[in-house]
Amino acid sequence: MAPVLFYFFAIMTLVFAVAVVANRNPVASALSLVVSFLGLAALFVGLDAYFIAVIQVLVYAGAVMVLFLFIIMLLDLRAEERRRVNIFAFVGGGLVAVAFVAQIWMVLQRFEAGKTAFLPLPAERIDDVRNVGRILFSTHNLPFQVIGVLILVATIGVVVLSKRELK
Amino acid sequence: MTLTLNHYLFVSGLLFAIGFAGVMMRRNIITIFMCLELMLNAANLSLVAFSRFNLVNGLPNYNAQVLVFFIITVAAAEVAVGLAIIVALYRARQTIHVEDISSLKF
């Protein structure tokens, strides 16, 4: 991936992630989240993970976002009125986040292996849907089936939770 | 100027920090939920970057991409259950502000 594209999509992802946090209107937050995830999918394409990029767009930008917007519509949420902010949570959360970024920065400064460029891939052999699928259905077959059961349980749980009265 | 693994890891760290700050700062439970998704995706980005960096026989390490696939699946299930809980909570309390929901607070 050209560095220009990397910077473009990385900045797009981060700016819209900040917009998710900063917007007071939940609909604007949800739409910023879509754009942020699209930028992230582009970064995945830059890392030659085409399958993951497509899944990211389908599942997050498609299904999960529709779910969020649907719930916002269902609850009929307006822009949040200004409240007295909890200073302790605000300052504490900001400080921990800044400290985390500073730590990541200092660790990466000393991480020599990460400073070398990515090795090129043999262009004719990139067939990553087939490769991911082969590994998914052979080495990781049991977790795959457990995930299937998990989704079934989640579906039943959602139906039970959404019923009018819980008994 | 070439791209290195550290670039991607730093973007991933920043994204995680933004999500974390959102979880701590915001009082709207739906926004908090969106910030949780941001944090999960930051982890996915660093996994994919490591997968591309550690080549196995000249190909990316696809085990990491399978793990990312699982994370996305579990996150989707988590969103469905979480939003159902939020709807049930709203039905019981008519609020989505975390400050108004303090029955279990010590």
Image (cartoon, coloured by chain):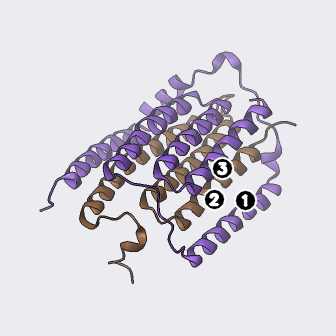
Q: Are the numbered discs 3 and 2 placed on the same chain, yes or no?
A: yes
What's the CA distance linking mark 3 and mark 2? 9 Å
Q: What kind of element bears circle 2? A: helix
Q: Give me the residue at 57% from left, 56% from top.
A: A21
Q: Give me the residue at 42% from left, 31% from top.
A: A137
- Amino acid residing under circle 2: Ala
Residue that numbered label 2 is attached to: B17
Q: What kind of element bears circle 3? A: helix
- B39 lies above or below B8: below
Residue that numbered label 3 is attached to: B12
Q: Colour of chain A?
A: purple
Where does the C terminus of chain A fall, quadrant-wise? bottom left
Q: Please tell me which residue lies in front, B1 or A112.
A: B1
Asked if one can make out residue A63 in the rendered structure from this viewpoint, the answer is yes
User: Mark 3–mark 1 contact, CB under 8 Å?
Assistant: no
Which chain does tag 1 point to?
A
Where does the N terminus of chain A fall, quadrant-wise? top right
Residue that numbered label 1 is attached to: A104
Please tell me whether mark 3 or mark 2 is closer to you in this view: 2
Give the letter of the brown chain: B
Left or right position of A78 against B57: left
Marks 3 and 2, the one that precedes in the sequence: 3
Which chain does tag 2 point to?
B
Q: Please tell me which residue lies in front, B51 or A80.
A: A80
- Amino acid residing under circle 3: Ser
Q: What kind of element bears circle 1? A: helix
Measured as percent of width and height from the top left, residue B97 is found at 41, 66
- Amino acid residing under circle 1: Ile
User: Mark 1–mark 2 contact, CB under 8 Å?
Assistant: yes
Pointer 3 local density, CA inside 10 Å: few below 14, some 14–19, many at least 20: many
What's the CA distance linking mark 3 and mark 1? 10 Å
